[in-house]
Amino acid sequence: MLSVKFLFRTAKNPGWLLLLAFLAACKTAYADDGYRLWLKYELIGNAAVREDYIKSFRFIATTDTGAVAGHAVQELRAGLSGLTGKQIPLVKTPEPNAKGIILAISPRGQASGDGFAINLQAGNTIITAGSPAGLLYGSFALLRHLQQHLPLEKVVGESHPKVQLRMLNHWDNPEGTIERGYAGSSLWKWYELPETTDPRYYDYARANASIGINGTVVNNVNASARFLTTEYLQKVAALAGIFRQYGIKTYLSVHFAAPKTLGGLKTSDPLDPEVRKWWADKVKEIYRIIPDFGGFLVKANSEGEPGPQDYGRTHADGANMLAQALESFGGVVIWRAFVYKADPAADRFKAAYEEFVPLDGRFAKNVIVQVKNGPIDFQPREPFSPLFGNMPKTPLGMEYQLTQEYLGFATHWVYEAPVFKECLDSDTYVNGKGSTVARVVDGSLHNYPLTCMAGVANTGSDRNWTGHPMAQANWYAFGRLAWNHTLSPETIAEEWIRLTLTHRAEDVATVSEIMQRSREIYVGYNTPLGLSRPWTGSHYAPEPWQNRSSRPDWTAVYYHRADSLGLGFDRTASGSNALQQYSGRAREVWQDPRTCPLPYLLWFHHVPWTQKLGTGRNLWEELCNRFYTGADSVLWMQRQWTRVQPSIDPEIFANVKTRLAKQYREAIWWRDAWVLYLQTFARQPVPAIYARPTRTLEEVRKSVNAYLIR
């Protein structure tokens, strides 16, 4: 039973006080700045539903006095108070015939690990789990159900995560900036830590726990060795102390050359005894300061970052050195497969496969190789990485990007769940039909002992966390899919809309339709038909003509290969032969331009401008159709958004409305840049049904240059 000391301690918790303040504020103010995310707990307007919940939840009881279970109780009390307008007491012994919520650890029950079960027994709602974290996840699941005003009897069931490590990767730097971050500066105020902890850290942890995220990497993969100093480890420990109260482990990205840059050694060779000892000693220090430390994330020998290949060693040599240092503490190494060399004769598409597949089975048992969903770099649409399915002896983790590096930053509305699902549902065919990427990642295809799904975080210091209010849905969708990848984008979207925006059925359907179509609309005016996104210094402005860089694969022309004959990158046997890295039916379908699905056509084929496609148009005509239709569809998004205005908070509505206006202007920018540039090769007119761009190619180039120099 809960002690008075425990109740007093939780009452003083800054996150708990902040939560109560927000609940009070939401009852007195209508404007919503987006801070509360999907955890609003607003009073239920339907009196019948509200009264049913009031009758069902007269008390909360638990025997677990730990911090994690304590937060489960706090959340239930706050949530039920907000939803019903009634205070729900925490009791030691329920009154006879009273109905309430009972939280119970049941290590021998069906719900083990992070899983939980919710049942109705004798009028009570029983949440059982094999761990305190499971109780917390079960409590959030119950509240999520109630927030949608659903019948209580439909909450009954069990839930188990498909993936063990469900993580956010922050690309935050020690000076407070965020690489590829579009929602302000870093959440972590390193200059204040460890003495001062921002109450926002608690709300960050709450939000993650509510969707099942159980790990966070707090710093950039382009890591500074500073984070391994004692000074910064103490700062990280202050964050870890908050996160562990919500079942979240803390991880660090590490600079592979730290033994030289920080330790003063002559080398960082992973096979050097002094280097191995340095890492072993550093790991011991970390666990003295952060006893539940999760492990290391490593970007090595990629884009100029140091790594084991600097010493003639393999990725396995580097990963295994760190794994040995972490093994006795239960820590893991997450080694990123994002590697590619500056070879003008090579195809960057093939790089990760060529470096990692020969190493399959040579990694230590506590190493996970983390693979981006596609073979290039978080493009608006990519085929799945050929690594998935081809490393049966090495656990492969999934890496998605929530922050919209190539999806319009925080300006363009793009719902990313379809991106995530498109990859997860792809069939690798390595063990026959049904060998999906999802089954690789969750370990069921190859019996991986470790499983991981990571998302590059889109959070920042902006009051609404993600810059674009609708980008909150991408954080939410990632967590829900990491827990259960069988959920559909439609289900997740409708759930998020009801928790965040409105319960009005017609408006839920309208916003959901915008979300489901948003990714295809963006691809339409940005990278249709598998047209690979050109690289630019900003990753934002259209620059398809860009052809100068220190390395060929940092130019635009490297990817789209436009010439007088056609467009696209030939990856068949007559080209780079990257398709050979895929198996069975996937390769067979993609290698024939007649059967290759149009969304991937230019990924794998150099197609003549006059080639007739399945749509009845030739390549040039189809490109124009998609560029123009995509840009015009943003006008459709604007009209649909206007329809839901009466049921959307005015502050959120206005925020999204202005962003959609800018999105349309920039969609035209992208459309004109591509159409005018590609026309110089295709030498065909813009079809008469479309208005010719009002700007010349030179004028568009000047507008891009003006953007890039500001």
Image: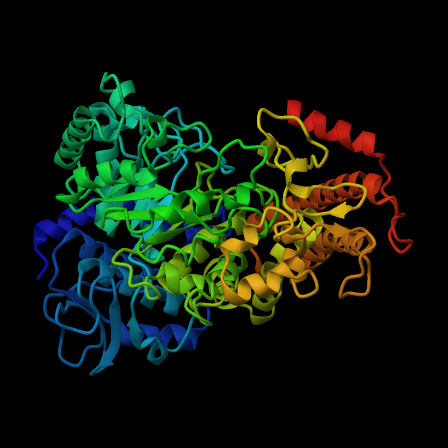
Q: How many marks?
A: 0
Q: Relative to 48, say whether 231 is above or below.
A: above
Q: Position of residue 363 (x, y in %)?
A: 27, 46
Which quadrant: the N terminus?
Answer: bottom left
Q: Position of residue 370 (x, y in %)?
A: 37, 47
Which image quadrant is residue 320 in?
Answer: top left
Residue at the right extreme of this rendering: 688
Which quadrant: the C terminus?
Answer: top right
Q: Position of residue 33 (x, y in %)?
A: 49, 46
Q: Relative to 51, say whether 496 is above or below.
A: above
Q: Nearer the viewer, residue 625 or 107?
A: 625
Image position of 585 (left or right of 156) = right
Could you tell me if residue 504 is visible in this image? yes
Q: Position of residue 411 (x, y in %)?
A: 60, 42
Q: Residue at x 23, y 35 (%)?
A: 238
Image position of 433 (left or right of 23) = right
Q: Nearer the viewer, residue 134 or 296?
A: 296
Q: Relative to 537, say whether 140 is above or below.
A: below
Could you tell me if residue 649 is visible in this image? no
Q: Residue at x 17, y 51 (%)?
A: 67
Residue at the bottom extreme of this rendering: 122
Q: Relative to 423, say whether 563 is above or below.
A: above
Image position of 635 (left or right of 407) = right
